Image (cartoon, grey):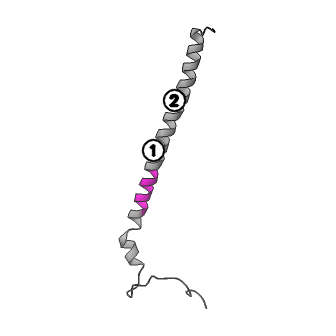
Amino acid sequence: MVEIGLAEYFGMAEAMGIIGTMFVVLYFSRKQTQKLSEDIETKVSKRFGPKDACSTRDISGATRTDKGRGKG
């Protein structure tokens, strides 16, 4: 049977600690990325909300296009 010394235990604990830290960092960075994307989505939806959507419609209800403008 092979004897494992104190230094080997510390080496294994160090490796497990590094791997555990990587998982914690990955978890929180993913969570932060999701929150950031939700914040950006909220800002965009507030910026282009119903007010701007109504301003791009004609009286008839059809959407405006720039086709044919500026030619000739």
Q: Main secondary structure of the magenta part?
A: helix
Q: Position of residue 30 (x, y in %)?
A: 49, 44
Of residues 36 and 12, the one drawn nearer to the viewer in this rendering: 12
Rendered position, 50 above or below 8? below
- Quarter of the image containing the C terminus? bottom right
Direction front: furthest residue: 1
40 in magenta: yes
Please name the residue that numbered disc 1 is placed on. 31
Q: Position of residue 69 (x, y in %)?
A: 55, 86
Name which residue type carries label 1.
Answer: Lys
Camera-near label (2 vs 1) is: 2
Rendered position, 13 above or below 26? above
Q: Secondary structure at mark 2?
A: helix
38 in magenta: yes
Of residues 65 and 2, the one drawn nearer to the viewer in this rendering: 2
Of residues 48 and 14, the one drawn nearer to the viewer in this rendering: 14
Q: How many marks?
A: 2
User: Badge 2: how crowded within 10 Å, few (<14), some, or many (20+)?
Assistant: few
**Disc nearer the start of the sequence (2/1):** 2
Please name the residue that numbered disc 2 is placed on. 20
Rendered position, 23 above or below 36? above
Q: Magenta stretch: give its range.
A: 36-44
Left or right relative to 58: residue 29: right
Which label belongs to residue 69?
none
Determine the CA span between mark 2 and mark 1: 17 Å
Asked if the residue under mark 1 is in contact with the one under mark 2, i.e. CB atoms within 8 Å, the reply is no
Q: Position of residue 5 (x, y in %)?
A: 59, 8
Name which residue type carries label 2.
Answer: Gly
